[in-house]
Amino acid sequence: MKYNIALLRGDGIGPEIVDSAVRVLKAAGEKFGHEFCFTPYLIGGAAIDETGFPLPQETVDGCLASDSVLLGAVGGPRWDNLPGDRRPEKALLGIRSALGLFTNLRPARLYPALKDACPLREEVAAQGFDIMIVRELTGGIYFGDRGYRQGKFGLEAYDTECYSPMEIERIARVAFETARKRRGKVASIDKANVLETSRLWRKTVHQVAEGYPDVEIRDVLVDNAAMQLVKDPSQFDVIVTSNMFGDILSDEASQITGSIGMLPSASLNETTRGMYEPIHGSAPDIAGKGIANPIATILSAAMMLRYSFSLAEEADSIENAVDRALNEGLRTGDIAPKGAPTLSTAEMTDEIIRRL
């Protein structure tokens, strides 16, 4: 099979980690008899420097014409003083909207080999956890009306949280379908004791739940969810929540795994085209040093094989290669114990490819 993949390397360590994932995909393609064709496009700060815009139309068109999209990271301090609509991060909202990517899947798993890197108590880490966070991605406060106005105390800024039943229904269905393939439990996160949007969220999620009697549903207020994630993360299977709550909770979940450099994500629409990216940022302080952890991006590529191309065996082979590398003690600097030997970005990629 032949697959066309749009590459959005972006900024900071983005080019390095995307190139690592490309190497792994090529190796998997050789092993299983597939051809992966890659076309690079500009996004974020790199696009601003080249075109003046964080998301050129050529990039949007190229992503729409591809079978899937692999993204590195965007942003950095050199662009921090630009207006909000011209900052690199604006490109992320734009490409998600252009591709209709309303679902974000963020797995948070504590690898047994990395339990010593988990910041939680030893007895909590020993239980392990494997969570799938299903985040709504194209609605909520990030896409609502915003601006400035005169208020009670003079000039004030405002951002508006809005959700429709349709937006909630479709993300809830993704969560319930995902839970059916896992341990059959969904925790719906909201702030229904305060927010009207959350009250609609809770009502709509329970309406969808009626069609999934085999899946356990419970409601958790977002502040309690934040506490429970560090108290007993093993209680969670699938978490479904709104755009902003999902952004915050998924980053929290990433930290209790031991390193944000380990976690992939998939952003999906109602077709097979998706966008896959590590959840960490562009890390400009280490860009070009060859020390970035490529595993999150490599695992994002594995998610692409699984969700966009239905290549489960190929995805398993990459994930198993990562497991073997970790179990054999191979580490980049962010996940290595103090004083332990570390591998560069390229060296870790080489070791994962060897284990394919």
Image (cartoon, rainbow, N blue to C red):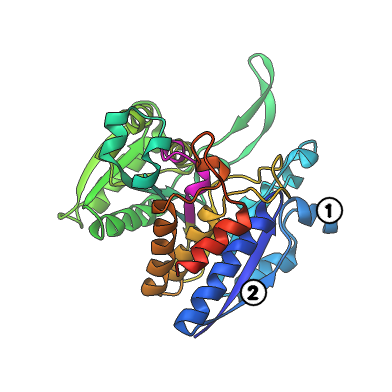
Q: Residue at x 50, y 83 (%)?
A: 34
Q: Is residue 311 left or right of residue 301?
A: left
**Would you name the residue on which mark 1 appears?**
49
Residue 297 position, x and y percent, is: 54, 57
Residue 137 position, x and y percent, is: 49, 50
Question: Residue furthest toward the top?
Answer: 153
Q: Which image quarter: residue 19?
A: bottom right
Is residue 256 covered in magenta?
yes
Residue 7 position, x and y percent, is: 65, 66
Picture layout, residue 301 above or below residue 79:
below
Q: Which residues are magenta?
A: 253-265
Nearest the eye: 350 or 24: 350
**Would you name the residue on which mark 2 appears?**
38
Q: Amino acid at mark 2?
A: Phe
Q: Is residue 292 left or right of residue 188?
A: right
Q: Which mark is residue 222?
A: none
Q: Which image quarter: residue 226?
A: top left
| Quadrant of the snapshot with the C terminus | bottom left
